[in-house]
């Protein structure tokens, strides 16, 4: 039983660093290219890459991305 608890603790702690950086950023602009450029600038400032998770238009563009390190 103690071995199972130890194994579960090791698994939980090994996954923690993988999920600890997830950061969401948003940008708005009048074009998709402009919004993505703003996201790219934020990612560059953070020293990370990015993955666009959401983009929609309604009299402008709103874009959300997840920074990946």
Image: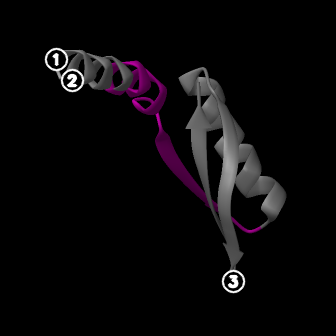
Label at residue 65: none
Residue 45 locus on image (x, y percent): 58, 25
Task: Give the residue pinned by disc 2.
Answer: 5
Label at residue 2: 1
Mark 2 → mark 3, Cα distance in angstroms: 54 Å
CA neighbours of label 2 inside 10 A, class few (<14), some (14 to 19), many (20+): few
Q: State the residue in front, 26 or 14.
A: 14
Is 61 left or right of 45, judged from the image as shown?
Answer: right
Mark 2 → mark 1, Cα distance in angstroms: 5 Å
Sequence-first tag of 2 and 3: 2
| SS type, badge 2 | helix
Question: What residue range appears in magenta?
Answer: 12-30
Q: Are marks 2 and 1 in contact (CB under 8 Å)?
A: yes
The residue that appears at 71% across and 56% down in the rendered structure is: 35
Task: Give the residue pinned by disc 3.
Answer: 59
Residue 49 locus on image (x, y percent): 68, 30
Q: Is residue 28 magenta?
A: yes
Residue mark closest to the camera, 2 vs 3:
2
The residue that appears at 54% across and 25% down in the rendered structure is: 46
CA neighbours of label 1 inside 10 A, class few (<14), some (14 to 19), many (20+): few
Is 43 left or right of 6, judged from the image as shown?
Answer: right
Placement of 32 over or under 5, stated as above or below: below
Residue 47 locus on image (x, y percent): 60, 20
């Amino acid at each position: 039983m103690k071995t199972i608890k130890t194994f579960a603790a090791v698994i939980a702690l090994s996954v923690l660093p993988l999920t600890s950086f997830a950061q969401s950023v948003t940008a708005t602009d009048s074009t998709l290219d402009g919004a993505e450029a703003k996201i790219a600038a934020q990612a560059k400032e953070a020293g990370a890459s990015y993955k666009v998770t959401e983009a929609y238009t309604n009299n402008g563009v709103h874009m959300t991305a997840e920074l990946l390190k």
